[in-house]
Image: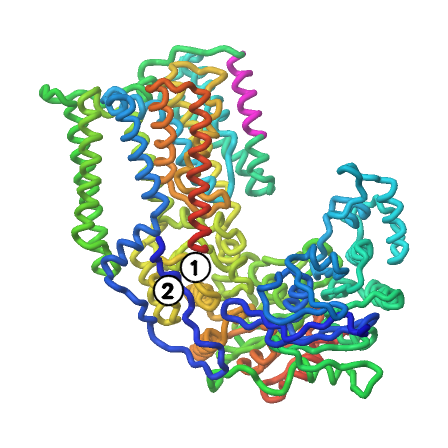
Amino acid sequence: MTDLILQMRSISKSFPGVQALADVTLDVRRGQVHAVCGENGAGKSTLMKVLSGVYPHGSYSGDILLDGEPVEFKDINASEEHGIVIIHQELALVPFLSIAENIFLGNEHARAGVINWKETLRHAAELLRRVGLREDPRTRVADLGVGKQQLVEIAKALSKKVQLLILDEPTAALNDADSRKLLDLIGELRSHGITCIVISHKLAEVTRIADAITILRDGRTIETLRVGGADDVSERRIIRGMVGRDLDHRFPARTPRLGEVALAIENWTVHHPVDAHRKVVDNVSLQVRRGEIVGLAGLMGAGRTELAMSLFGRTYGRNVSGRVFKDGVEIHTRTVAEAVRHGIAYVTEDRKQYGLHLLDDISRNVTLAALGKVSKGPVISTPRQVLAAESFRLSMNIKAPSVHELAGRLSGGNQQKIVLSKWIFTDPEILILDEPTRGIDVGAKYEIYTIINSLAAEGKAVLVISSELPELLGLCDRIYALSAGRLTGEVSREDASQEKLMRYMTMVEG
Amino acid sequence: MTEVQLVKDPSEPPSPAAVPDTGPAPAERPSSAVNALREAARRNIRQYGMLVALGLILVLFQIWTHGILLKPLNVTNLIQQNSYILMLAIGMAIVIIAGHIDLSVGSLAAFIGAAAAVMMVQHHMPWPAAVALCLLMGAAAGAWQGFWIAYIGVPSFIVTLGGMLVFRGVTQILLHGQSIAPFPPGFQKISSGFLPEVGPNTNYHNLTLLLGLAVIASTLLAQFRERRVQQRYEFEVLPLGWFLLKCAGVVAAVVVFTLLLASYHGVPVVLLLLGGLLLIFGFVMRTTVAGRHVYAIGGNLAAARLSGVKHKRVTFGVFVNMGVLSALAGLVYAARLNAGTPNAGINFELEAIAAAFIGGASASGGVGTVFGAIIGGLVLGVLNNGMSLVGIGTDYQQVIKGLVLLAAVGFDVYNKKRVGS
């Protein structure tokens, strides 16, 4: 019998325009904790979705061998039958059901459809003991903290006779104490023979618990490091594997011409909208000059988008404090309209969710944020609106037969150009671009970079939020790094390297 | 629809050195005329589809009823019977486009009818003053519901379900469970009056003929002007032949309709009212900032908010407007019955909602037109009238109307899935 519980061989998976996984190989030994590391978008989550049957057999190429036997999962239930359970980053619990009900959801202790409560509660209590959660199984999940909810998820996995447990960023939302407890629990599960695959950005945790570490980059396996062998498994070593050596993308050339400081933020602090004690952005100060492209680096949950949205009309968070200056004069941006009036534009990250009316046409999407420019009083001039959109269709090279095409029918790159057009149409002086190239192909990325460069060349101040470090390095004059809501570093283009940024981005202040 | 060019980014295989082709993408156009036609058809498939369906239903019942359906008397009846539902449908379309629903309109209409009866019949208030006061009350009722929905954030379904009960109850309290009648003749005219006779006897209603001519002239003028503007900006337009055919079709429809009305009592007052509303709201929703904001919040609230749309104010306004239109519908209905009764307006909300959906509004918001809702309302109205004429019982009528609603929306959903948007 092999000691490999899982072998994934030559897994490839592509989405329209994007190769998410290319020839990925993953070997996991029985009874080990196996970490999978990589930047945002490196393909970790996609790989786990392939493994757990979220992407069914046939939608990817390559083989999965479990205990040496090839398996083909057509959905999550099929993988669970083989003892593979995935716990997603966003917990999948029903908040208004009890712990016990959640643990056995879809898998109830029942006879002829009638639930056996006695058995349910007894079994739930036993599982809770195993994960070290001292709560009444009748407690509503909504009344538990995130750390305890995470434990309920694990108890739920145990109830399914799990052999291979996949945890996607299990500690992302946890505080230090809860994280430590969870890591201890993972170690304990290992001693009971349960194999774990852990996806994590927190390298300190990875080096603490993992027996093996597989590093993914741009949808490819870079290497697998085994603890206890000849491999160096220091954080520095992992970071080198994660970021690679070469820039994978080409960037249009540009000579920056910097002007005065256009946007300055001082002591910006934002609290979580629900959990008012949590600071999502903590005392951040930064500035952007005219003609400058400044990057904002950070891993998921670092507070980048939250910073941008709280600045843009307080569209995120509560108890926002701090000062904003434009051209040296203090301004207020309490509503979106106010921010726009001051020449600030925020190009949102998720274009489908926050950027576009997908069932409306290009011209109406492009003009939405500045209808005043195409109307006389309250009446919109259709010709002017169409002409405005048409000029963007040409200048931005939006590939659509006409501006009457519905936004939802276009590819990601072209949708992104519409969102950009919408904000450029407001004549902004300061642009905040949130993940401007996520999910679009290389050719379209190059076009977006060209547009960003020309905006800077016009003397606009540009702040770019991106999870792709090569993009920030290739595009920006200066890069700030955020970690857990705090500004942990600032590097100029000359000094910047992916290793350096990654160090700042994974820095946790004690 | 199979030949629609789905725009797929013709992107090069992702290679790091990929340099984008600059300049406008020369989309393949076999012939711009055919393309324009296809484009127009595709963009309006829902509305054209419903127009065609309405035409088919008309023809079907015209044959089935041996020509009674389109007799001048019956056409006039059709208009008067359905006017209040169509008014509600206009407001309901806007509510649904904004991503909400209003279940209270029938009860509110009843309440306003009752209030009008109390004011005019019991307190002898002059009818124009009573009408104005009633419309204000409608606005206030809409503002009340809009406040809870827009500013407090209670789902519109709940707020208006509550409103449905409240307004119905208040109606019964106000009327003590009994009808109040009759209304002054001036008020009745709103619903049952016609334009006055003028000029020599021509066997036709002269003013109606003139009005028909005016409608034809202004429609043609607007069509040609729009075409000229589009040509000046070098937009794609329908080929001249097709354009003329379209104009001829519109003119023919207006001529037939005008002659039908003119050979009876002429244009009902309520039709003028309805036409005015359609013009105003069609314009507002199509070409004003306010209208655009309604589409934006219904289509993607987050995007609208981040684009600076004052979504709360817009939502509030939409419900105030619905309140006023409900009041108007209540007045028209009361005038038609010539009484304020506790059971007025039952199921009006359902008819109005069905009309909006049949007319192409999307249950998730952001899509739909006022014109579509009118077409949807007419489909329902003609079905009602036609089926009654051929003697189909109300039991079967309900079944058929329900299936029509399902079929229309089902076709829509299926169609959207097929084109992949």
Q: Is residue B86 magenta?
A: no
Q: Where is residue B55 in the image (x, y as percent from the top left)?
A: 29, 35
Q: In the image, is residue B198 above or below residue A286?
A: above
Q: Mark 2 points at which residue?
A: A400
Image quadrant in which the C terminus of chain B is located: bottom left
Left or right of residue A370, residue A43 in this image: right
Pick the front one: B281 or B36: B36
Going from the N terminus, do you reach mark 2 or mark 1 first? Answer: 2
Q: Position of residue B185 (x, y in %)?
A: 32, 14
**Residue at 77% of width from left, 57% of height from top?**
A146
Q: In the image, is residue B341 above or below residue A189?
A: above
Residue A433 shows in the view = no
What segment carries the magenta color?
A: B162-176
Dot 1 falls on a residue whose secondary structure is helix
Q: Mark 1 points at which residue?
A: A409
* Secondary structure mainly formed by the magenta segment: helix
Dot 2 falls on a residue whose secondary structure is loop
